[in-house]
Amino acid sequence: MTRIDFYILPDTTLEARLGFACRLAETIHGKGYRLHLHAEDDAMAADLDERLWTFRPDAYLPHARLGSDMADSVAVTIGHAGPPEPHPEARTAMLNLAPDIPEWFSRFERVAEIINQHQQVLTAKRACWQTYKQRGYPVKAHQLRG
């Protein structure tokens, strides 16, 4: 069964949320997972693509946007529409930055949700939390300090 982790940030900005997403992506990738970053829309996917190149000067996180020629050859993908191709031999995780839960979330071993203190994000992610719990998924909260 998919394990769900919510990371709760004290910040209110999208900048803080996406910055943390890059650091968390690096950690998840470092633990050997094949990771998909599910963005809200194409603009957020493009922003994440750029940030993953620049979030830390000494970091390198090989990644590609879904639909690109490199998407099947890297361990980190970014998209906003459909799911990445399945990789049954790999440990898989998804970082969900969209307001809703994609219907295909359960194909991943782990799902991470990032909450900041922006009212729209709080409202959307509370609904996600309730949906996961109602469906019987194990959900854990990680309260992060500023």
Image (cartoon, helix red, strand yellow):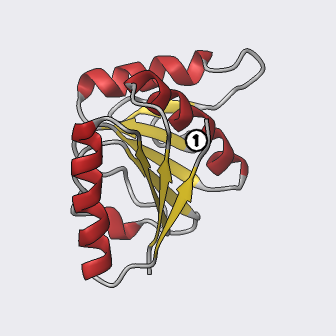
Tag count: 1
Give the residue at the far bottom of this rendering: 136
On-image quarter of the N terminus: bottom left
Residue 68, image x and y in percent?
Answer: 38, 29
Q: Secondary structure at mark 1?
A: helix
Which residue occupies the foreground of this view, 109 or 13? 13
State whether residue 99 is above or below residue 106. above
On-image quarter of the C terminus: top right
State whether residue 6 is above or below residue 116. below
Residue 57, image x and y in percent?
Answer: 73, 15
Residue 111, image x and y in percent?
Answer: 45, 60
Name the side, left or right, on which 100 lies relative to 65.
left
Query: Which residue occupies 25% across, 80% down?
Result: 134
Name the side, left or right, on which 137 lies relative to 82.
right
Q: Residues within 10 Å of mark 1 (few under 14, many from 20)?
A: many
Which residue occupies the foreground of this view, 17 or 25? 17
Query: Which residue occupies 58% across, 41% down?
Result: 25
For badge 1, the amino acid type reads: Ala
Which residue occupies the foreground of this view, 107 or 100? 100
Query: Which residue occupies 64% across, 31% down?
Result: 61
Name the side, left or right, on which 71 lies relative to 82.
right
Residue 126, image x and y in percent?
Answer: 27, 58
Query: Which residue occupies 50% across, 51% down?
Result: 7
Find disc 1 in the rendering and name its residue.
25
Give the residue at the far right of this rendering: 58
State the image quarter where residue 139 is shown: bottom left
State whether residue 1 is above or below residue 99. below
State whether residue 2 is above or below residue 39. below
Name the side, left or right, on which 50 lies relative to 82.
right
